[in-house]
Amino acid sequence: MDYIQLSRISLKHLSVLHVLLATSSVTKTSEQLCVSPSSISKTLSQLRLLLNDELFYRDGTHLVPTAYAIKIGPIVHSVLSSMNGVIHQQTFEPASYSGTFKLSMRSSAFEVFAPIIAQLASEKAPNSRFQVYSKEQLGLDALIRGQVDLVLLPHDISQPPTDNSDLQWQTILDDEMVCLMNSEHPLANSELTIEQYLEFRHIGIVEKELSVPFFEQNLAQRFKPRNIAISVSDFGSGALMCHETDFLFTTSRIWAETARQARGLTMKRLPFDYGKVAFSMVWNKASINDPSMKWLYNELVKESENLVIR
């Protein structure tokens, strides 16, 4: 181990690098770390010499990380998380915690978990700050880089959020799948059959990070693929399209019973085996040493027990 070289790199250097990777901005990094922009620039210059890499290139007002900076990002996150656990040990008190929790999820997941997040932010950790990002903006890759603390998402159980060894996931809310349709739909007043389900066109969801769901594969193998008329970014958009068309929308039952966009739509049980679905929490295993993260994970698991399928 090169102790001499290691002694030249401080936690300040690693903290600056980590936040720069998250913000792509010297100004935003200085604000988050409560130091001057010139101090951040000086630290970055030192890092460039110590690591023998440019680390960031300027593109207008943003900093673009080099391939090397992206590669070492998860390692830096792991080191900082471990040190944070050492510093705070088991002394975490949510009522006095003034740090920031960074979550990422689709708006549909936020609609389901909003009551829990609201309670945590207003009652249990009132001095903390919650930043909720769109999964399309900061997804699983951002979780690996340490830009967000956890991701909440609905998914097929046979479709794990990731096989990356740096990430772990846990099912926190079992769910069911249902078919939504316009209340004036020709099938609204009859029991849905597989023939009818496949006869009509469908609304799909765009998902870039997960594999093809089991129910899609099962339909294609046993019957035929769904005829997707339009693919949208989120459940809410799918429900709005249901109101305007005769397209069918296959989605989460918990979400459909929660979301305002789904009100007035007719809900049907699916006429085929779709496996098991759930909402899961995905986190970077390096952050498990952080007492604040442990608290957040435990609270989400505990409070999710109150969100049951009616």
Image (cartoon, grey):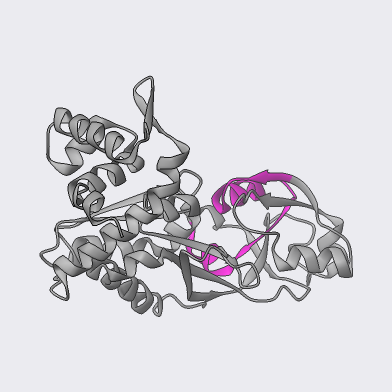
Can you name the residue that lies furthest to the top here? 60
Residue 307, by quadrant, is: bottom left
Vertical comparison of 191 with 56: above or below:
below
Residue 288, by quadrant, is: bottom left
Q: Is residue 243 magenta?
A: yes
Residue 142 visible in rendering: yes
Residue 32 in the image, given as x and y percentages of width and height: 20, 42
Residue 198 in the image, given as x and y percentages of width and height: 84, 60
Q: Residue at x 35, y 36 (%)?
A: 52
Residue 272, by quadrant, is: bottom right
Residue 206 in the image, given as x and y percentages of width and height: 64, 48
Q: Residue at x 47, y 59 (%)?
A: 109
**Residues rendered magenta in the picture:** 230-259
Vertical comparison of 6 with 164: above or below:
above
Q: Is residue 255 magenta?
A: yes
Q: Residue at x 23, y 60 (%)?
A: 121
Image quadrant containing the N terminus: bottom left
Depth check: 41 or 214 in front?
A: 41
Depth check: 99 or 107 in front?
A: 99
Residue 284 in the image, given as x and y percentages of width and height: 41, 63
Vertical comparison of 53 with 160: above or below:
above
